[in-house]
Amino acid sequence: MSDPYKILGVSPSATDEELKTAYRELAKKYHPDNYSGSPIADLAGEKMKEINEAYDAVVADRKRQKSQGGATYTGSTSDSGYGTGYAGYGYGSTNSSFSDVRNLIMTGRIADAEQILNGVPVDGRNAEWYFLKGTVLYKRGWLEEAYNSFSRACQMDPGNAEYRAAMNQVTNQRNGAYGGYNPNIPRTNGCSSCDVCSSLLCADCCCECMGGDLIPCC
Amino acid sequence: MFGYVRPQKSELLVREYEQYKGIYCTLCRQLGTSYGIASRLTLSYDCTFYAMLLFSLNPQCPGFQSGRCVVNPFKKCTYCNAGEKELIAAAALSVMMTYQKIRDDIDDSHFLGKLRGYVLLPLAAHARKKAARDFPQMDRAVSALMIQQRKAEQSENPGIDLCAEPTAKMLEQVFAMAVGVQPDEESANARVLRQIGYYLGRWVYLMDAADDMEKDIKTKSFNPFVIQYHLTAVSTQEELGNARERANQVLNLTLSQLTAAFNILDFQHFSPILENVIHKGLPEMQKEILFKKEKTNVRSL
């Protein structure tokens, strides 16, 4: 195993707090949510595992150091906050009419899955068909048509949580939650209502120090 | 490419900015030595990014030294003193894409544009021939782009995804060559690089299309957004604004995939600059081009 500090991007002299922050940053970066439905989800999973192992090793090592004063990287028990076993949207739901397609998608045979889907006649295309078609298109990078397919699936079966989850993810990505630009959210820190109140209170305190009063009731 | 892939200068450290400039200037010099003086004019931020990405995957770190700018002898420039291989690859890409762009312009534009194209074409053709000899695989990928693009534009229902596919596929192949792999290799780095190339190409194509929306409505040129959002010469400002917002969402979705792929890659150096480009430079470009009130030309770095 290579140097766990290097994997986490901190120096060995970093404090526990810094270590935790660095770990959280990385875990956020490789979180399965960012990769669900992506053909490189497995690589992100490996990264996540690496980070978890490195963090566990360092934490265990520091614990031991505190009690004994020795320093070696061995043994690790997983107590980190994020899991790694994630395979996209919950594939393999029961009573699926397209279980063969789902299997193909799971094993990464996207072209075969698409071929079967395209062979389904138009009147046999139900909500699940549109969902799976969207999943296939998403993996191929045809993001707009994937989005349209997901929204069609949601329209046809509004109660289905699986379709809804896929739709929500794409909608968030479109709104810039995973990188990009959203014209409706100001990037600079604005002045929230909380800031207004606390500023007024401060001003009141200052006035009272000088013998005056800004807000008579407090 | 079109100069959309660049860092956000205000977020770079001075040291990082100098390094970026250094690669930029060295690429310019390399263009001159490899493909002739005229090919220096093809220098772009996009190819600088490509050169930088190639450098960052190589364990050997390039050093910098100072020298004089050839174009402006009174200016001092920093030059890289290593990494010829990476620079030549980026220079070749620059030359090939410019050549294809000129040919595309000749096909698309009217009298004056055609004339300009025919004047520039022999210069570009000479440089491109040389570049194609050095990188035959890259030339095949870039040449295929234009043919596929035409096919996509003339198809029955030119959707956004279909139109963006050729540029995306082209960069997918060009980026996969970065690690010297065959286009179909399945190593982890090759898979990630292909994804990065695909979504970067898609982003660049869509950004260009979004940028040209108004111009293309006027000149009745092909534009996937204009077709998809049913824009015409009589569309109101509000309809245009809506179209821009929707185009921005398409770009965001593309960028989310690009960021995800980019984060997996391990860089040996220049990672803060590359991260700046992907995480800040590209969103900034969307903001500049789609949401600035008065439209000015984006300033050079």
Image (cartoon, helix red, strand yellow):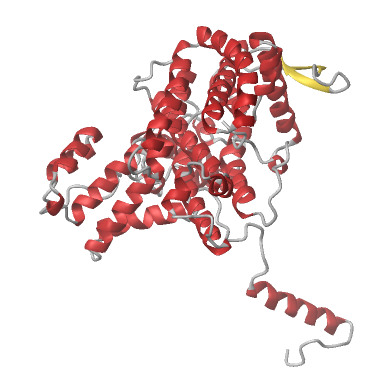
**From what the image shows, is residue B255 above or below residue B149?**
below
User: Relative to B150, is B26 on the left or the right?
Assistant: right
Instruction: Pinpoint residue A104: horizontal percent, then vertical percent.
Output: 19, 37
Residue at the outermost bottom position: A217
Residue at 86% across / 81% down in the picture?
Answer: A209
Instruction: Give coordinates of residue B35: x percent, y percent.
Output: 64, 11
> Between A10 and B294, which is closer to the camera in this rendering?
B294
Name the residue rendered at 66%, 17% in the picture: B39
Please report the residue visible at 58 percent of the width from the left and 23 percent of the height from the top. B98
Displayed quadrant of residue A109:
top left
Q: Is residue B237 visible?
A: yes
Q: Nearer the viewer, residue B64 or B129?
A: B129
**Image coordinates for residue A135, horizontal then vertical, percent:** 28, 45
Residue at screen point 34% across, 20% down: B184
Q: Is residue A61 visible?
A: no
In-front residue for pair A76/B106: B106
